[in-house]
Each structure stands twice: as C-alpha cells, then as structure tokens.
C-alpha cells in the first residue's frame, strides 16, 4: 500500500466562505482533527460532540418528539453545539433520531422506535431476526439486485411488500420486454412504487434538514466529525440479513457460501461507501463495528471471517482519499494487534470499552484514537467523576503523545445529566488546552 | 460419566467438537434404529455440553460455538423427547434456581440467552422470563419460582435505571433477603452495580456461572 501513503484526503466540501469571521476558528478546529489523523500532535486536545437521544434530555422533550420534529432537533443540536463548544460535531447530531417520518412512510420492520413499538421516552431498538434465510445464499450471490427487490425489501419495509411480485428483469429483451413489463401493471406492484415515492420524498425532506443543520453549524465555525457512515461486510450480513443466531451457525454450516457472500458484500459496500462520501464531500466515514468484540468470536474466526473483507474495504477507502472511522464496540483488546495492520496516519479508531491506554500502546503510531468516557460514569457519576476520567485520559494517553479525539464511549449516553456533559467539555479545556 | 460403547463416546466427541451433521446422524441412529433409551442420549448430550462449557471457559470456544451447541441440543431433543415414556425424571441434583430476564425498556437477549445456557449446563435450574420484563413481573416470578439467584440483563444505558427500579421493587416486596441479585450486559460495571444496588455484576457468562456457584456454596 505504499502508493496509498501519498494519496491526498478528500477535501471538505462544506466550509465557511473566504472572509467569513468564523473561517479561522473553523479551520483551527478541523486542523486539530486532521493533525491527529496525520500523525502530528494538535495544539490542544480535540473534543467531539456526538449525541443521539441525549438531545431530548438536554432539551427536556420526549424521545418521540426528537424522533419526529426536524426543527426542534436542529434547534437543540445547534444550541448544544454552541454551549459545549466542541471541535467537531456529529454529522446531523442525530444519528438516527429524526428518522421517524421516513421510517413511518416505509413501514420499516427492523426497528422499533419511540412512538412506534417502544415508549415515547425510550430509544429505538433493532429487532434481531432472520431477514434472509440460510437457504438463500445462492440466490443472493447469483443476483443481489433481484434478491434485494423481490425478497429483502418486501421483508424489511411494509410499504414495499408489493415488490415481491415485481417481474424479474433479466430476460426482458426485444419483444420480451413488452410482455415482461406487464408485471409492473399489477396493482400490488404499483402500490409499492407509490408508497416508495412517498417514502423517498420524506427521506429527501430529512436530508434537506440535515444539510440545513450542517450549513448552520458550519456558519458558526464547527466542522462535522464525519460526513457519512457505512458498515463492515460481516456486520451488515449478520445484523441486517442473517440475524445473530443465523450468522453464528453459518460459520459452521455454510462456511464457503458465507465467505463468498462476505466478499460480494465487500465490493458492494466499498463502492457505495466511496460514492456516498464523495457526494457528501467529507473524508471521514463512520463505521459502527458490532461483531468484532473479543467475546463474540475466536481469534481464528476473526481472522478468517471478519477482518480480511473489512481490512480490504478500509484499504480501498483510504486509496479513494477517505478516512475510515470504525467504532469498535464493546471490548476489542484482543483484536488490537490484528487491526493494527493498516497504513499509518489514515484512520480514526474509536473504541467503546477497550482501554485507551492499552490501545495507545499498540496503535499509537498507526491511528488517531477516539473515545471513551464510560457510559456508567457519565450517566450515574458526578461532574467531579467526569473531570477525573477526562484527566486520566489526558495524562495517560494525550500527554504521552496519543493522538486522541475525546468523546464518550459511543457518544453521549441518552441519560447523561447535562452537568456531566458540561464537565466533560470543561475538563478537556482545563487539562489539555 | 461412564460411556458404554464406542457410539456413546463418539456422540459426545462429535457434539463437543461442533461436528453437527455426523453428531445429529449418530444421535438419530441411536434413538431410532438402535433403540437407545432417549434419556441416555440426552445424558450424553449434556456431557457434551459440559465439555463445550469448559472450552468456553478456557476461551477456546466463543459465542458461535455456544449457539451451535444449543441448536444441536435442541434438535436432538426434538427427536428424543417424544420417545420418552414415564416423564423426564426429576432434576434432583440441581445446584440452585436462577430467575433471569432483560429489564423493562430493553429488548436485547443474546447475552441473557448465553448466560442462561451456561448456567443450565453448569447444573442450575434456570427460568428465563424474556425481554422487556416489567418490574412487577420480576417480583411475581420471584414469589412463584422461589429462585436462589436473580439475574438482570440489559444492554442499553436506560437499563441502569430499570435495574435500579427492579431491585428497589424486589426490596420493597420483602423478598430480597432470600435471593442474590446479579446484573450483566452491555455497559454494566462496578459503577452500575453500586448505582443499582445489585449484589454483583458479571461481564460474561463465565462470571455469571462463577457467581452462581459461589453463592450456592459450590466448588467453582
């Protein structure tokens, strides 16, 4: 990957215009993150604001209101940004909140969210199920698009159930096209398309609100921490298709097909990820990592099933000028030596429960670290406890040359008392400039 | 346990080694052709599961092996159980009773299921009351099932408060003195244990088994 080292990163598309009074402060903030990524010590410890349903706590509203009210969510996100004064802000400060209207329009089946399946004051939760059967590997491998259209989408979106009766496109040539088209006249197929257009319009509305929010915080001098997100091949297949039980038994029952589909998924996801990041104009891509933790599989299984496709995907992203930002959920201490095998100064590794002091020892010369004040501390501790935890990370990681983007373990937990959030940002300035 | 012949030894070995196809075929042959007593076959399965549990504790096996082991056991059980005449026999040698569930507001169950499986193969009688379990249901189930240990599971940070409320309700119902309460899952740590008032927390199924055995005065 020698050539990768010389590839420039994708430039930020969204920046304050020349002459803007916040141009300097915006650039200084962004430089802090890029210094960390590129192997230089920043002038001070950068801090990220990443919040999902915490904004409801902050604004004293229900999670349901946050899930459905675009304007209120933007207002709270902007107010929190201005008050806490982070160096970088999560793209829409919502990461899945405000998705209510779009999910509703789609009659989305894989989540229960506030106001739809869980209480108004509870966060959304994913429903772990088999959305693809064990017998369907061949079908998916042979023609992913047909599998998505006729099997997968009708299962995960009630609005799209009619797609199950959509005509099969290959074979529609010459006069066969005319006869084949008749399938699109079926009432259930037409109805699915009509609902799809409505859901698409809602998704466009949400995207416009996100773009509006990004513009507003840029105008206040705050860069976003990432512009888009994606998933690792293993996680996408395990979480959204096979379900936990299906995937874990496939390791034994369908090993070869699983490996083949993981590789196909890698190609699909890599293309999609690069296209999305370029469209958004932001080099950093957030990648929540679900199935890598130490307890979830053996080292041998990790090396065989998880890491090869994900590593290859990250290398291609890096080659395209992107900065992968995997969030290694739970404890991944045993994976540190393995995941160190990527080009230096090209990625951000966010750790949820892995000890950052240990991560710094193994990965300090390779990646920028992000994290990881513990959720239990932030939600049940006092501001003094938070202060001490920040100080610990400053002394044991940042002051020892660790390129660190300070954050909570997975953004601010929903229940974090506002004074604890304030303490986190204040302590960063107190101990590290 | 004593193995009577090669088939018995082989069945235990195949299941313990995750050799599902051959293990299932052999179990089927023993049950349907050789007319081996179904309770005997289930005993052999349990012996295999004990090996699986030990390998999990030794970090030779991980979640995928436990999940497959559970499915192998279920599938053989589906063939064996209808063949049993005269009941399953009493569970006279259980170490103790454990009531386990995911606290209200939280729908996650993978960790809870693994803990249930490991407690079961380590000799506990476990009652799993599912996910999103209301506070009152825990109290009612404690009164009815009379567990020695209660396990509260939760993945989300909201579970901290749900666990605290559940434990407070158990206290107020006056049934706390008879039981020990362990919590686990996701972000649970000593800070959460202190916050919720649980007796102990565990970060994985092995710790849950060790806690259960310690509380029952058994050798770990």
Image (cartoon, coloured by chain):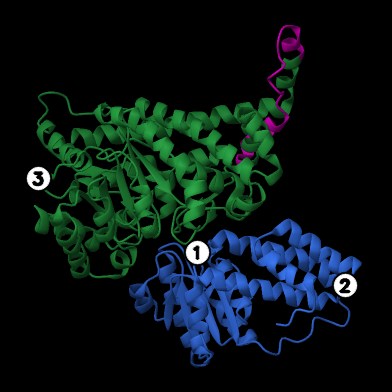
* Any part of residue A402 in sight: yes
- Circle 1 or circle 3, nearest the eye: 3
Colour blue belongs to chain: B
Instruction: Check whether the beta carbons of the residues at disc 2 and disc 1 lie within 8 A of each other.
Output: no
Instruction: Check whether the beta carbons of the residues at disc 1 and disc 3 lie within 8 A of each other.
Output: no
Binning the other alpha carbons within 10 Å of mark 1 as few (below 14), some (14 to 19) or many (20 upward) gives many
Residue denoted by label 1: B105
Residue denoted by label 2: B83
- Residue A363 position, x and y percent, is 27, 50
Q: Quadrant of residue A326?
A: top left
What segment carries the magenta color? Answer: A156-179
Mark 1: which secondary structure?
Answer: loop
- Residue A125 position, x and y percent, is 50, 54
The residue sitting at 61% across, 28% down in the picture is A145
- Residue B209 position, x and y percent, is 52, 78
**Subunit of label 1:** B
**Subunit of label 3:** A
Task: Please tell me the colour of chain A.
Answer: green
Q: Are marks 3 and 2 on the same chain?
A: no
Q: Is residue A18 left or right of residue A410?
A: left
Residue denoted by label 3: A43
């Amino acid at each position: 990957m020698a050539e990768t080292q010389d590839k420039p990163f994708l430039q930020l598309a969204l920046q304050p215009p020349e002459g803007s009074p916040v141009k300097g402060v915006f650039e200084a903030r962004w430089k802090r993150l890029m210094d960390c990524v590129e192997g230089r010590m920043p002038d001070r410890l950068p801090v990220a604001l990443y919040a999902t349903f915490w904004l409801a706590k902050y604004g004293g509203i229900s999670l349901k209101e946050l899930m459905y009210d675009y304007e209120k969510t933007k207002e709270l996100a902007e107010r929190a940004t201005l008050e806490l004064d982070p160096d970088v802000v999560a793209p829409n400060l919502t990461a899945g909140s405000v998705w209510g209207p779009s999910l509703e329009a789609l009659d989305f089946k894989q989540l229960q969210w506030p106001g739809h399946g869980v209480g108004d004051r509870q966060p959304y939760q994913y429903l772990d199920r088999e959305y693809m059967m064990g017998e369907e590997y061949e079908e998916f491998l042979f023609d992913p698009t047909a599998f998505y259209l006729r099997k997968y989408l009708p299962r995960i979106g009630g609005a799209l159930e009619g797609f199950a009766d959509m005509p099969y496109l290959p074979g529609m040539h010459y006069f066969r096209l005319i006869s084949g088209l008749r399938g699109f006249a079926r009432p259930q197929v037409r109805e699915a398309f009509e609902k799809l257009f409505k859901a698409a319009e809602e998704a466009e509305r949400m995207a416009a609100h996100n773009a509006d929010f990004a513009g507003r915080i840029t105008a206040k001098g705050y860069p976003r921490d990432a512009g888009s997100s994606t998933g690792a091949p293993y996680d996408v297949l395990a979480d959204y298709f096979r379900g936990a039980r299906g995937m874990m038994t496939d390791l034994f029952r369908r090993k070869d097909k699983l490996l083949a589909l993981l590789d196909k998924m890698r190609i699909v996801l890599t293309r999609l990820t690069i296209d999305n990041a370029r469209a958004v104009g932001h080099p950093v891509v957030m990648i929540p990592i679900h199935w890598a933790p130490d307890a979830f599989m053996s080292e041998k299984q990790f090396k065989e099933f998880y890491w090869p496709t994900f590593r290859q995907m990250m290398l291609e992203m890096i080659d395209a000028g992107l900065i992968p930002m995997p969030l290694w959920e739970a404890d991944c201490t045993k994976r540190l030596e393995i995941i160190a095998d990527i080009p230096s100064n090209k990625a951000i590794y966010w750790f949820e429960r892995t000890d950052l002091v240990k991560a710094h020892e193994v990965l300090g010369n390779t990646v920028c670290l992000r994290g990881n004040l513990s959720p239990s501390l932030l939600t049940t501790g006092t501001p003094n406890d938070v202060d001490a935890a920040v100080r610990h990370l400053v002394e044991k990681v940042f002051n020892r040359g660790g390129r660190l983007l300070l954050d909570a373990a997975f953004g601010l937990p929903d229940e974090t008392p506002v004074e604890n959030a304030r303490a986190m940002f204040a302590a960063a300035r107190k101990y590290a400039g | 346990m004593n193995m009577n012949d090669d088939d018995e030894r082989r069945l235990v070995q195949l299941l313990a080694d995750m050799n599902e196809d051959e293990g299932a075929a052999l179990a089927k042959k023993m049950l349907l052709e050789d007319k081996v007593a179904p309770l005997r076959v289930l005993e052999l399965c349990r012996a295999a599961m004990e090996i699986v549990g030990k390998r999990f504790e030794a970090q030779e096996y991980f979640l995928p092996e436990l999940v497959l082991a559970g499915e192998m056991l279920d599938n053989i059980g589906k063939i064996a159980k209808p063949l049993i005449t005269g009941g399953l026999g009493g569970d006279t040698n259980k170490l103790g009773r454990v009531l386990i569930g995911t606290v209200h507001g939280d729908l996650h169950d993978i960790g809870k299921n693994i803990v249930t499986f490991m407690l079961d193969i380590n000799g506990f009688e476990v009652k799993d009351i599912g996910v999103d379990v209301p506070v009152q249901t825990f109290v009612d189930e404690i009164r009815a099932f009379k567990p020695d240990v209660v396990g509260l599971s939760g993945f989300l940070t909201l579970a901290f408060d749900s666990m605290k409320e559940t434990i407070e309700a158990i206290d107020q119902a006056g049934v706390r003195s008879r039981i020990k309460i362990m919590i686990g899952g996701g972000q649970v740590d000593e800070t959460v244990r202190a916050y919720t008032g649980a007796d102990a927390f565990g970060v994985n199924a092995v710790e849950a088994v060790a806690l259960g055995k310690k509380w029952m005065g058994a050798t770990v």
